[in-house]
C-alpha cells in the first residue's frame, strides 16, 4: 500500500508569526481535519516543540500531495518540506 510521508519544519520567524496570529492554527487544522475525514490523511504528528510535523497520506500521488501542502496557511512559514513515497508492509 503506497503512502507519502511529508516531513515539515517551520522557520523560527514563522513560528513567531503563527504564535502571534491565533486564527492561523485554526485554519491549518481545518485542512488537517478535512483530509482525515476524506480518508487521505492516515496519520498526523507534531513535535513537542511544535516546530516540526509529519503527515502520512494515502490514496493520492505525490503531485497531488504537494499541491495540498502548498495551500496550507502555514506553507509560507515552512523552512523545509520533504516528501518520501513508501510502500506500507504491515
Image (tube, rainbow, N blue to C red):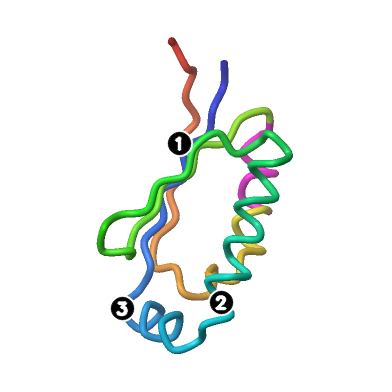
| Residue occupying the far right of the picture | 38
> What residue is rendered at 53% in x and 71% in y?
25
Callout 1: few (<14), some (14-19), or many (20+) C-alpha neighbours within 10 Å? few
- Give residue 12's mark: 3
Secondary element under disc 3, as helix, strand or loop, is: helix
Q: Quick check: 72 above or below 54?
A: below
Marks 2 & 1, CB-CB < 8 Å contact: no
Pinpoint residue 63: horizontal percent, then vertical percent: 67, 43
On whether residue 61 falls in the magenta region, the answer is yes
In the rendered image, the quadrant that contains the N terminus is top right
Task: Say which of marks 3 and 2 sits in front.
Answer: 2
Residue 24's mark?
2
Which comes sooner in the sequence, label 2 or label 1?
2
Q: How much space separates mark 2 and mark 1, taking CA atoms? A: 26 Å
Badge 1 marks a residue whose secondary structure is: strand
Q: Residue at x 47, y 44 (%)?
A: 44
Q: Pinpoint residue 28: horizontal percent, then vertical percent.
A: 58, 65
The outermost residue toward the left is 49
Give the mark nearest the N terminus, 3 or 2: 3
Magenta: main secondary structure equals helix
Rendered image: mark on residue 84: 1
Magenta-highlighted residues = 60-67
- The percent position of residue 77, horizontal first and vertical second, equals 46, 74
Contact between labelled residues 2 and 3, with CB atoms less than 8 Å apart: no
Q: Quadrant of residue 41?
A: top right
Q: Residue at x 26, y 64 (%)?
A: 49
Amino acid at each position: 500500500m503506497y503512502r507519502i510521508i511529508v516531513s515539515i519544519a517551520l522557520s523560527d520567524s514563522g513560528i513567531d508569526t503563527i504564535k502571534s496570529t491565533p486564527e492561523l492554527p485554526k485554519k491549518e487544522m481545518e485542512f488537517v481535519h478535512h483530509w482525515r475525514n476524506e480518508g487521505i490523511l492516515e496519520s498526523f504528528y507534531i513535535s513537542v516543540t511544535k516546530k516540526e510535523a509529519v503527515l502520512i497520506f494515502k490514496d493520492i500521488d505525490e503531485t497531488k500531495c504537494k499541491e495540498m501542502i502548498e495551500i496550507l496557511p502555514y506553507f509560507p512559514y515552512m523552512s523545509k518540506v520533504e516528501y518520501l513515497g513508501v510502500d506500507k508492509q504491515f
